[in-house]
Each structure stands twice: as structure tokens, then as C-alpha cells.
Amino acid sequence: MANIHDIARVAGVSAATVSRVLNGHPYVSDEKRQAVLDAADQLHYEKNINAVHLARGKTETIGVILPFVSHPYFGIILSGIASAAEKNGYKLMIVQTNYNVMQEMDALDMLKLKQVDGLIITSRECPIELVEDYSEYGRIVLCEALSGNLLSSVFVNQYEAFKSALSFLKEKGKTNIGYTTLRMEGKSSSARKKAYEEQFGEMRRHWVFDQALTIEDGTRIAGEWAALHDRPDAMVITNDFVAVGFLLECRRIGFSVPGDVSVVGFDNHPISSALNMTTVELPLQQLGEIAFQQVISVEISHMEVPFRLIKRGSA
């Protein structure tokens, strides 16, 4: 593979001149610049981008760790990150992990190996202590509630957001409330469990439906709900797409919403408006934009973004 010394020999200039031309520096005559470009083309020269990154100490690339690329919740966060990255001249490297710890560690190693300038972790499975160990290699931002001076964070208060949905249903006279979650052991799930038990006491385990991610999951959960002899008369469904699947399946099998069961979703995706569904709005686009600004900042910061209950006809 040709290097700058080969180009210098063919072009009849110094290696320093070749370096200035290839890196876009001024103060090179048009004649010498063209000679270098012609020689580089003749030798099929390709710049070693890793060497350039090491020399500059910067890749102008940010890594984004997310569990699922295709899911709307993470897709909207990613959209916010991408919008801010484009405005600031950065590229993104996307890593889908499926909550696999080894995949997350591989992504963290990108920071250690200087393949990215920083990392944004939208959701994680690996221990926080492990993530903190990598902070010496570059900026890391987590999309969750956090404190301390090693990592930045931007988050929605999941406890308060879930509590607002429960309080709204309680005001409506609902006391038999079930809910969905993606992972029983997740940090957000713990916040929801705490909010529920503070208002209604110990949760009936069979009123918590897990593995809730897609419209199809909502359809499945509606079937599980309908099969119960002591069905909840309200459901807080922590994802609008799951809520849509639940709502439509309930109506298909003969239950009315909100007559037989009230439904509150999360995210305020446009589909919730189309179906007149009550939901908790989470400003995920803004969260992604803030996460990007944090990852390129030299300061450690912790920011909370507000949620909003949108009252419609499903509850």
C-alpha cells in the first residue's frame, strides 16, 4: 500500500508537502498541490483513517449504545442524537446490544481503543461500576437518573411519570390497576413497582405483564388479561405501541375501552393521538439532543427532562 513517501517521490515534493496537501492545509502552491493529488491517484493511495484519528486525538464520531434499533422509543432518542450530531459535524456509530453485557462491553472498548470520541448509552444491562471504569477513556452519557462526577446523565423521572398515571386513574375511581414492563429486573421497573406500592400496597404478581415491547406483545397481553378471573379494571402500559396492541385486541374480543378497562400508554407517539389514547408524553427527541450536547461537552452534568400526562378517551 502506498504511503506519503511514495507519493512524495512520484510528485517530486517533500513528504511534509504531501502531508499538508492530504490534510487540507493552506500555503501549498497550486502546481505542487495538483502534483500530489495526481501522484496519490496514480498510486491508488487511501488515507489510513485510524492513523489520522490517533494524530488528531479525535475521531469526530460518537458511539450510541441501544438495546433495540427498531423500537420507536429508542428510535426517537436516536433521532434526537442524530439531529444534534449532524448540526455539529459529527458521525454516529450505532451498536445494538439486545441487553447483552458482552455486546455492551465491546461497545465500551471502542472508547478505550479511541474508535469514538464518546459514548451515549440509552439503556444498559452491565453494572454501573463497569461503565464508570471506562470514563477515563472519554465522555460517557447515560439516559437514566444518575449522580456523581464521572458520567453525565439525562433522564425522565420514571418514578414520577408512572406515579402521575396511577394518580390519574385513582382519581377516576380505579383501584385495581395492572401494568406492563419490558424487564422485571430493570431500573425503570423498580421505580414503577415503588410508585405502585406506595399508592396501592403490594402488587398482585399476575397483574404485572412483562416482555412488553411491540404491538404484538400488547395483543398477547390482552389475551392474558382477558383470561384472568380477577382482571384489573385499568392498565398502565409503558409503551404506546404495546398499549395500542392491547387496546385493539380488547375491543376485538368484545371488551370496551374504557368501559371494561381503562388504558394509559407512555411516550405520546402519534399513533396514540390517532386512537384517542391517554398517554404520558416523554420528550425523547429532546432527551437525545441533550445527550449529544453532554457527550461533546467538557463538563459533567445531570439533566432531567419533563413529562406530561395527555388525557384522551381511553381512560
Image (cartoon, rainbow, N blue to C red):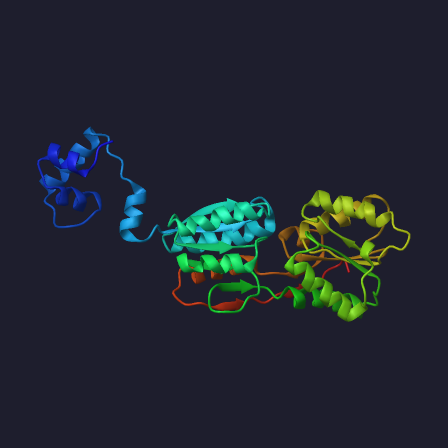
For the C terminus, give its image quadrant: bottom right
Res 315 visible: yes
Determine the image quadrant of residue 157.
Answer: bottom right
Relative to 160, is 68 above or below? above
**Residue 15, image quadrant:** top left
Quadrant of the rendering where the N terminus is positioned = top left
Image side of residue 262 versus residue 10, left or right: right
| Residue 310 visible in the displayed image | no
Position of residue 108 measured from the top left corner of the image (x, y, whole percent) = 47, 51
- Residue 56 is left or right of residue 266, and the answer is left
Judge left or right: residue 61 versus residue 73: left
Task: Judge by depth and name the residue closer to the eye, 95 or 138.
Answer: 138
Q: How many discs mark residues in the rendered view?
A: 0
Is 3 placed left or right of 217 in the picture?
Answer: left
Q: Residue at x 63, y 52 (%)?
A: 270
In the rendered image, residue 186, in percent from the top left (x then y), is placed at: 65, 56
Tell me the residue at 16%/41% (across/down).
Answer: 18
Residue 174: percent from left, percent from top:
83, 65
In this view of the protein, which residue sits in the foreground, 33 or 45? Answer: 45
